[in-house]
Amino acid sequence: MEDLNDLNPEEIPGVREDLENDTAAAAARIQEYLETLNNIPLNIAITGETGSGKSTFVNALRGLSNDDEKAAPTGITEATLECTPYPHPNYLNVTLWDIPGIGTTKFPADKYLKLVGFEKFDFFIIISGIRFTENDVKLVKEIERMEKKFYFVLSKIDNDIRAERRETDFSEEETLKVIREDCVHRVAQLGIESPKVFLVSSFELHLYDFPLLQQTLERDLPKNKRDTLLFVMPNINPEIIIKKKEAFQNKVYYYATLSAIGSAVPLPGLSMVVDLAVLVSAVTEYVFAFGLNVSSLKRLSARTGVPYADLCAVINSPLAAAEITKERVQQALTELKHRATRTAASRYIPIFGIPLALIFSFNENCKTLELILDELADDAQRVFERALV
Ligand code: GDP
């Protein structure tokens, strides 16, 4: 178990005073804060020539297979000159933009960037299936001038690895190193100093350099956007699942406080009063970020070929792979109540100057949410192992 000091929620200005004087106002403030957190926009520009694997990469980041009805069309030879927004299926505040490769337009790089509305993008991913060209570099120089971040992604690396595997002295690590160094060298020769190049297979995001790309993006983003990126990331490794859980642990305070304030309803058979609607919101967030909602699991099944039923078979929580209703959450609370751990003290210290009368409810809510979070994170871990390992 993590140290208590790891839990370090940001204090919402004004909440402490409101809690002492007017709990309804405090609830409204917390609610507004959570809504803002959940709606931070993230716009990711993906550009590259036709055939580079742009659409497949966009689909992979959205957790879709290329034949999903919401997928970006792939394998087309016509170059699109339009910027096409592809919202993330679970997070409408996150959009991946397929923007035409600069080589497909007649515009010089500066005009091109103005035309695509570069200001709205948080960063650019320049993708190529073979090697980066002068066109890519021209664009990157302009992106740099506009003080935006960019990353080179060499796609279809699985093909290279497959081809090299036939060699007798094959080493995946060595092959990747050679390709990466060659790519970095070529881009540097075209005038970009220390370019960030990532070798990726959109069919297997958990392999090669994609995890490193994810870490780099996370590090480079402003702090307030890091969790937004984290929650949309597919579960490509156990570390991502742990990070998602930690991000939610910080929010437990807010949900527990909200539920305690709104806790007018004593639940039959439970020694606690909760606001079920608040718990439903929290649980829904967890389930979606862990990819444990029905449609995410179906998409994972379509992407990996592992039958949906096999993914469901490793899930323990009654809240995963199901519609999250008040009844279902209430049922889950009843089951949790019988767990020995419920008698353990809550590791969350009420920090907000919460009224004494609400502390019991706050503690119970914290324990409940933490147990649910633990269980869902464990399920996410097992689903990841079943699907990808
Ligand atoms: P776009 O024109 O840049 O959008 O490229 P697409 O996404 O349509 O991809 C072009 C072709 O490359 C399609 O047949 C894809 O299946 C294939 N492709 C794309 N990404 C990968 C990858 O990472 N690995 C492999 N093996 N094939 C890929």
Image: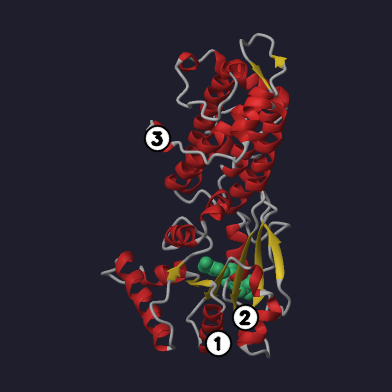
Q: Quadrant of ligand 1?
A: bottom right
Q: Position of residue 138 (x, y in %)?
A: 54, 87
Say which element carries label 3: helix
* Viewer-proximal residue among 69 and 216: 216
Where residue 188 is drawn, which disc sits there?
Answer: none
Quadrant of the rendered image containing residue 292 = top right
Give the quarter of the figure containing the N terminus.
Answer: top left
* Circles 2 and 1 in contact, beta carbons < 8 Å: yes
Quadrant of the rendered image containing residue 327 = top right
Q: Which residue is mark 2?
A: 101
CA distance for labels 2 and 1: 8 Å
Residue lying at 45% horizontally and 25% vertically, measured from the top left: 347
Q: Which residue is mark 1?
A: 135
Report whether 68 appears left or right of 147: right
Q: Position of residue 166 (x, y in %)?
A: 35, 70
Q: Which residue is mark 3?
A: 5
